[in-house]
Image: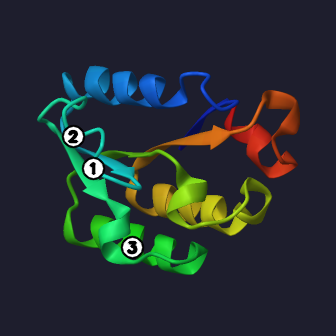
Amino acid sequence: MINLIYGGKGSGKTAAIVALANDNSKTAKGFHIYIDKSKSRMHDLNHEVKLVDAKEYSINDAKEFIAFIKGMVAVNYDIEKIYIDNLCKIVVGELIELENIFTGLEEISALTGVDFVVTANAEKDELPAFLRKYL
């Protein structure tokens, strides 16, 4: 399953995804992973939530990002949720160009049972059609 947190710049998406990760980690049976473009949220997240700085892994495009996620879930069967903040900045692209990532995340979720929460920097009426099913 994929859940989308959307809104314009400065609308509180990051605060919302951090709060969700922290709240969910309190009752988690598995691992919760928070992927961002930096380590700036290190002190905002509960210690139960593993912060991954995607920039450390030189992810350049959608294909590399999906391979990165597959690698994570392949070596750790206890991952329950993955929170992805600033996806467009991690893969350096526009939201409209990221359909392949969401398709890949759907496939990973169906195969492994891992749930994803992703932020999108866009208002509801600006979201590409392929993202509307995650609202």
Q: Quadrant of residue 24?
A: top left
- Front one among 41 and 128: 41
Residue 51 percent location from the top left of the image:
24, 48
Dot placed on the residue nearer the N-terminal end, 1 or 3? 1
Real-space Cα distance between discs 1 and 2? 5 Å
Residue at 38% x, 24% y: name it: 20
Q: Is residue 82 above or below residue 68?
A: above
Residue at 75% x, 45% y: name it: 131
Real-space Cα distance between discs 1 and 3? 17 Å
Q: Amino acid at mark 2?
A: Met
Q: In the image, 88: left or right of 19?
A: right
Residue occupied by mark 2: 42
Say whether marks 2 and 3 touch (CB < 8 Å). Answer: no
Say whether marks 1 and 3 touch (CB < 8 Å). Answer: no
Real-space Cα distance between discs 2 and 3? 20 Å
Q: Amino acid at mark 3?
A: Phe
- Front one among 19 and 73: 19
Image quadrant where one finds the C terminus: top right
**Which of the two discs, 1 and 3, sits closer to the camera?**
1
Residue occupied by mark 1: 39
Mark 1 lies on a secondary structure that is loop
Say whether marks 1 and 2 touch (CB < 8 Å). Answer: yes
Residue 12 percent location from the top left of the image:
54, 22
What is the count of numbered marks?
Answer: 3
Residue 61 percent location from the top left of the image:
57, 76
Residue neighbourhood size for the residue with mark 2, other residues' Cα within 10 Å, grouped as few (<14), some (14–19), many (≥20)? some
Q: In the image, 3: left or right of 67?
A: right
Residue occupied by mark 3: 68
